[in-house]
Each structure stands twice: as structure tokens, then as C-alpha cells.
């Protein structure tokens, strides 16, 4: 069910306060670049993770996860703690394929445990030579009796190497492009599966996975053989607007900081906000932010209404992440040298915002999707 604007605003305020008061202190203690079990458990304890899952699978939602609610949650958390928001988002990204395409026993094994904060999930799609071009992935799923052996490498994988379970996309039919990819549920402690973290600009839990003949049985196949690309794209379509929502949250925090600084800082005989160059920059930022928010929630509403939102989701992700980069950069500029101080709000936002234009499909990929959809629609 799509949230009405008033309910959306109430939920946003509630989750933003919860993140600020209860979750951010836990995130501040988290080890750089690794999953924080404390944050995962707290997201469940405070009722945030359960909102992703239906009640019959251990969650608190009336049905499949609402795209609108997902956007509200990510916007609120991103405005207070990007690490909390990313942890929440990846729990959803890693588990949604199981909820979407899993057999009853797969769902029963993993989804309630994710909702309780007892299991860390990861989404293993990207590879060293198949990031944006996901259909080109080469992780081999070679037949082995009634199952398969996975051999190859995944990289830029959310929550690797610490996840308890990964949704893994592998090639079951060579030279078949997107039509030769299957999805599997792979426990993180599987024999032959190893990993290591990747040191990023923003220290989030991302890593590389190596599959050395990892055995997967028929009951680990998600959906049908060679239909895994559809599972991956269904997940990304559901989550892309919420990447835009996270960008909106970061941008809102940056604009709030810029407005406060421009009001308090005096220069040339008055507050900065009275300088036309500053006032116009703030006005442009606010306009871009509102436009981004509208695109995000329009895409989410389309999904919640059961519509196909590939174009809207790509537009929301593209515009919101690009706008957030500009707004955060402007906030740093308006702070002057103070905006460069490590640990300051806008400096931290500057570090965090950059990845949003790359993951879950870089901006260039979103433009390609939009152009393709324009011709498809026309």
C-alpha cells in the first residue's frame, strides 16, 4: 500500500529520530569496512528490518515490501547515518531475491532469520569484468551430478566477506548472455568460498569473494535454471528508487547544514545568506532536492501500484544521485575551509555521496536504460 504524504512524513521523522538517537551511536563504534552485528541486531530490535518482510515470513508488513516505505526508511536513515542506511539496504538487497523467487523451504530457512537480525545477507552479482554489464558475468556453474560447482570471482559484493548467506548469480549456460544466468542461495560458510574486504573511500562493508568449486545443490537454485537475470533485475528495479531516496537523505542533511551555516556565518557586513551568489546556490539546491524527491516517490508509487517502473526507477536513481553530488559539493563550498575538516558533517557527506552514482548501476547505465525504455514505450 502506498503511504499517503502525511503518513510518509510521520514515518520519516520517526525513523530519522530513531536512527539519530539509537542506531548512530552503534554505527560510530562499527569497525571500518566490516559488517556490524550490533547495527544489524538493532535494526531488527527497533522494528526496522521486519518492515521489509510479510508477517507470514517473520516480518511486520502486510505483503511484499512497499517500495514507498523502503524509500522513506532509506531517506530517513541516510540523513543521519549512511552506515546504518547501507546496512539496512544491503540486508534487503541480499534477501529480496529469496523472498521474490525462493521455494518455501528456502524462504523459511533464511527470511525470518534476516528479519530477526540474526543473519547477514549479501547480494553477489558484480564481477571484475562484469560490473555494469551484468549479463556478461562469467562465474561458472558447472554441472556436478544433480547440482553444480561454482568457480570464479565476485567483487564489489555487499557485506562480503562477512555475510551468512549470499544470493549468487552464476553462468549455467555458456555464451547465452542474460539467458544463461541462474541464481543460487549460498551460505557464507560453504566449503571453497573465501573472501576479503575492499578498502573504500567510505568505509562500508564491501568485499571480494572467491569460489573454488563451491558445491550448490538443486535445492539452492533460486527460481528456474537460466532465469536468474530476471531475478537480479527484479531486485534492482525494486531497490533503484530507494538508492535515489538515500541520495535525497544525504542531500537534505547537506542542505540543512548549508542553510544553518549561511545564516550563522557573517561576511562582508552581514550573514552569508544575504549574498546573492550564496542565496541563489541555496535556491538551486533546494529545487534540485525537491525534484529528486518527486522522481523517487513517483517511481515507488508506480511499483506499489503494480506497474512496470524500469524507466522511472532509472530516472529516479540517475537524477537523485547526480543532484545529491552537486548539493553536497555546494554545501562544502559554502562552508569554505570549514567544509574540509575531517569529521565535519559536510566533509563526511562528501565522502559518502560519491558511491551512489556508481552502485546498482552507474549513471551512464541509467541513461542507457532510460533511452532504451523511451524507444520501447514509443
Image: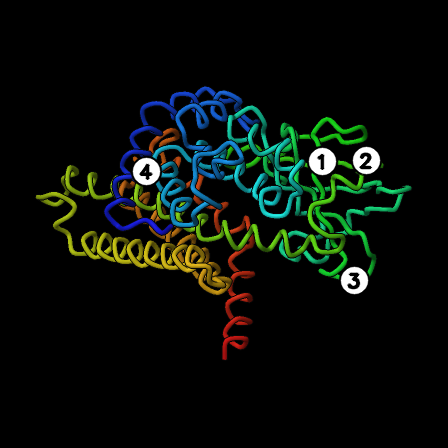
Give how far across and how far down residue 60 sits, in percent: 43, 34
What's the mark number on residue 214? 2
User: Which class describes the residues within 10 Å of circle 4: few (<14), some (14-19), or many (20+)?
Assistant: many
**Which residue is the site of mark 1?**
186
Cα distance between the residues tagged 3 and 4: 50 Å
Q: Secondary structure at mark 2?
A: strand
Task: Please give left or right for residue 309 compared with residue 189 in the image.
Answer: left
Q: Secondary structure at mark 3?
A: loop
Q: Residue furthest right?
A: 145
Give the mark nearer the N terminus: 2 vs 3. Answer: 3
Examine the image and state in which quarter residue 376 appears.
bottom right
Q: Do the residues bearing badges 3 and 1 touch, measured as CB atoms within 8 Å?
A: no
**Which residue is the site of mark 3?**
176
Task: Please give left or right for residue 359 compared with residue 140 in the image.
Answer: left
Q: Do the residues bearing badges 1 and 2 touch, measured as CB atoms within 8 Å?
A: yes
Give the mark nearer the N terminus: 3 vs 4. Answer: 3
Examine the image and state in which quarter residue 194 appears.
top right
Amino acid at each position: 500500500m502506498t503511504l499517503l504524504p502525511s503518513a510518509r512524513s510521520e514515518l520519516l521523522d520517526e525513523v530519522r529520530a530513531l536512527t539519530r538517537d539509537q542506531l548512530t551511536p552503534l554505527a560510530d563504534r562499527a569497525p571500518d569496512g566490516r559488517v556490524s552485528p550490533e547495527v544489524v541486531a538493532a535494526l531488527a530490535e527497533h522494528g526496522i528490518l521486519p518492515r521489509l518482510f510479510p508477517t507470514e515470513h517473520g516480518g511486520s508488513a502486510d505483503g511484499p515490501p512497499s517500495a514507498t516505505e523502503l524509500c522513506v526508511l532509506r531517506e530517513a536513515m541516510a540523513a543521519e547515518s549512511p552506515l546504518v542506511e547501507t546496512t539496512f539496504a544491503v540486508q534487503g538487497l541480499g534477501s529480496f531475491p529469496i523472498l521474490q523467487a525462493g521455494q518455501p523451504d528456502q524462504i523459511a530457512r533464511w527470511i525470518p532469520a534476516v528479519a530477526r537480525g540474526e543473519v547477514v545477507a549479501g547480494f553477489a552479482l558484480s564481477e571484475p569484468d562484469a560490473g555494469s554489464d551484468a549479463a556478461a558475468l562469467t562465474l561458472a556453474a558447472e554441472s556436478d551430478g544433480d547440482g553444480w560447482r561454482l568457480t570464479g570471482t565476485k567483487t564489489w559484493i555487499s557485506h562480503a566477506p562477512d555475510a551468512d548467506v549470499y544470493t549468487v548469480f552464476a553462468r549455467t549456460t555458456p555464451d547465452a548472455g542474460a539467458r544463461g544466468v541462474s541464481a543460487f542461495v549460498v551460505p557464507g560458510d560453504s566449503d571453497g568460498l573465501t573472501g576479503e574486504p575492499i578498502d573504500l573511500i567510505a568505509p562500508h562493508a564491501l568485499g571480494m569473494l572467491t569460489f573454488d568449486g563451491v558445491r550448490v545443490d538443486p535445492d539452492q537454485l533460486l527460481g528456474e535454471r537460466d532465469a536468474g537475470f530476471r531475478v537480479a533485475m527484479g531486485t534492482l528495479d525494486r531497490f533503484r528508487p530507494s538508492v535515489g531516496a538515500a541520495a535525497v537523505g544525504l542531500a537534505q542533511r547537506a542542505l540543512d547544514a548549508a542553510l544553518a551555516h549561511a545564516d550563522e556565518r557573517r561576511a562582508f557586513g552581514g550573514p552569508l545568506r544575504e549574498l546573492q551568489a550564496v542565496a541563489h546556490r541555496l535556491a538551486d539546491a533546494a529545487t534540485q532536492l525537491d525534484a529528486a524527491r518527486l522522481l523517487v516517490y513517483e517511481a515507488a508509487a508506480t511499483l506499489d501500484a503494480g506497474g512496470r517502473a524500469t524507466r522511472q526507477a532509472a530516472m529516479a536513481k540517475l537524477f537523485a544521485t547526480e543532484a545529491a553530488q552537486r548539493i553536497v559539493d555546494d554545501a562544502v563550498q559554502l562552508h569554505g575551509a570549514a567544509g574540509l575538516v575531517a569529521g565535519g558533517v559536510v566533509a563526511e557527506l562528501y565522502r559518502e555521496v560519491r558511491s551512489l552514482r556508481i552502485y546498482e548501476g552507474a549513471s551512464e547505465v541509467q541513461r542507457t536504460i532510460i533511452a532504451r525504455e523511451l524507444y520501447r514505450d514509443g
